[in-house]
Amino acid sequence: LIYTLTEHLNLQNNQLEGRLPRFNRKSRIEVLDLSGNSFTGPVESGIGFLRGLEVLNLRNNQLSGQVPLELQKLTNLRELWLGENNLVGIISEDICMLKENGLEILETDCKRISNRVKCNC
């Protein structure tokens, strides 16, 4: 319920663990900052339900799995922070196209030595 009523959710650096919360179509979050915690597991595809999201900061956790294609549905994003995790796969061209809609910051692990994330931007 809290996720459906909150527009700004900042829980950075709170030593939180476990999986990321799940979101639904009723969520009205515009700013979601869960950085600097110990979240594990994948970024669930339900993140695409957050159509009003302007800032998504998931950096510096222990997230793993593929970078979800559903991020391309977040056309209001201005900032997308995914670095310092264990994500793998490709930042698709569709996600990169968000830059044409106003995405100002796209921070990923594309330039890390491990090269686990490939960027098409």
Image (cartoon, helix red, strand yellow):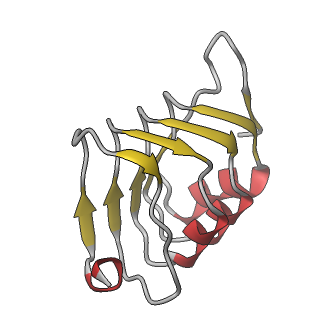
Q: Quadrant of the N terminus?
A: bottom left
Residue 30 is situated, as x and y percent measured from the top left of the image, at 35, 71
- Do we see residue 48 in this rendering? yes
Residue found at the far front of this picture: 18
Q: Residue at x 49, y 27 (%)?
A: 84
Camera-side residue of 117 and 24: 24
91 lies left or right of 48: right
Q: How many marks?
A: 0
Rendered residue at 43%/70% (across/down):
53
Q: Residue at x 23, y 38 (%)?
A: 13
Taking 39 as reference, is 42 left or right? right
Which residue is more in the foreground, 34 or 121?
34
Image coordinates of residue 115 in percent, x first then y, are 72, 19
Q: Position of residue 14 (x, y in %)?
A: 22, 42
Q: Quadrant of residue 120?
A: top right
Q: Position of residue 97 (x, y in %)?
A: 68, 57
Which residue appears farthest toward the bottom when viewing the image?
Answer: 26
Left or right: 31 in relation to 48: left
| Quadrant in which the C terminus appears | top right
Q: Is residue 19 above or below residue 21?
A: above
User: Can residue 74 be spotted in the picture?
Assistant: no
Which residue is nearer to you in this view: 60 or 93? Answer: 60
Answer with left or right where residue 95 lies relative to residue 28. right
Viewer-side residue, 91 vs 10 = 10
Q: Residue at x 69, y 14 (%)?
A: 114
Position above or below: 41 against 36: below
Residue 40 position (above or below residue 26):
above
**Residue 47, located in which quarter of the rendered image?**
bottom right
